[in-house]
Amino acid sequence: MALGRENTELSAKQLNHTHGQYFFSRQKKLILELLSPCAGEKMLCIGDDLGDYLQIFQDKWCQLTGFVSSEEILRAARRQTGEGIELYCGEFEDLPFSDDEFDVVFIIKALETARSPQKVIAEATRVCCGRVFIGFFNKYSFAGIHQNLKRMFGFPFAENTRSFSIDEIKDMAGGLIDIPAIKWGSVIYFPTIIYNMARDFEELVPYMKNPLGSFVGLTFPVKYIYRTVQSPLVESHQLKAGARTIPETVRSMLQNNDR
């Protein structure tokens, strides 16, 4: 009987590992479809679980910088990542980089624990001159509803994280860019038991603009338009030469709103 239990536990671990690999492959497909990273692009990746995601972009020959939230996570990330990746730590809401420093900013598993998710997005927009990608956990997916139920009944692992709806993330980004410019999709639609039996169902579901997946990827171009003092900063913003102060203006506006 003991041997039977060990075999069962081993099978469960193998199954979870297999599911994890498959779920990540689905995320990777969506990320590459939305972001289309190019060789030589300068990319900032923000989040506390960057290892596998950095590998996606390393395989595309991007110039990578990682940013995590603590020294402990930084040390672990340095052990996991290869050479050629710069790593820093600090607050996601206050990035120590110059305006327009990166072609791409990639946010993953960062908004869920941030004090101010909107500030994280604003900072990502400030340091970016190309496009921003946000990956997040969908509160209205099957898995999201399941997690919210666990939170309601006091399960501690869900206490320190939160999930978002697609509209919530759109609203946060919409204060900085033009809503029609946002592209998004989602993957991983079903309870785990479905993947135990057949993964073909997942492959049959279109993932672009699908609101049902557990993992949502959302991307938008970063554009700034210079406005006079009398004109509000309300539309998508086309950054032009000499307009370097505009991203800092976005940061100041958000700071003032918190007071």
Image (cartoon, rainbow, N blue to C red):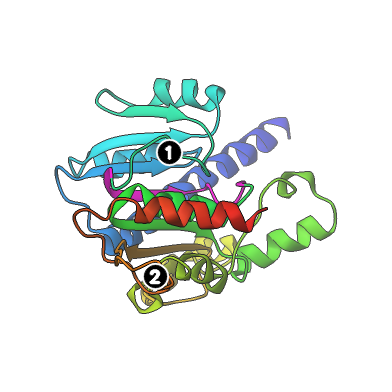
Mark 1 → mark 2, Cα distance in angstroms = 21 Å
Name the residue at the front extreme.
230
Q: Can residue 23 be seen in this view?
A: no
Q: Identify the residue shown where x is 29% and y is 29%.
A: 85
The answer to whether residue 36 is left or right of residue 236 is left
Q: Position of residue 202 (x, y in %)?
A: 43, 69
Q: Residue at x 45, y 49 (%)?
A: 123
- Extent of the magenta region: 101-114
Residue 119 counted in the magenta span: no
Task: Label 1, secondary structure: give it.
Answer: loop
Residue located farthest toward the left when viewing the structure as drawn: 39
Badge 1 is on which residue?
Answer: 50
In this view, 58 is above or below 72 = below
**Which is more N-terminal, label 2 or label 1?**
1
Q: Quadrant of residue 234?
A: bottom left
Q: What residue type is labelled 1?
A: Leu
Residue at the disc numbered 2:
184
- Magenta stretch: includes residue 106: yes
The quadrant the N terminus occupies is top right
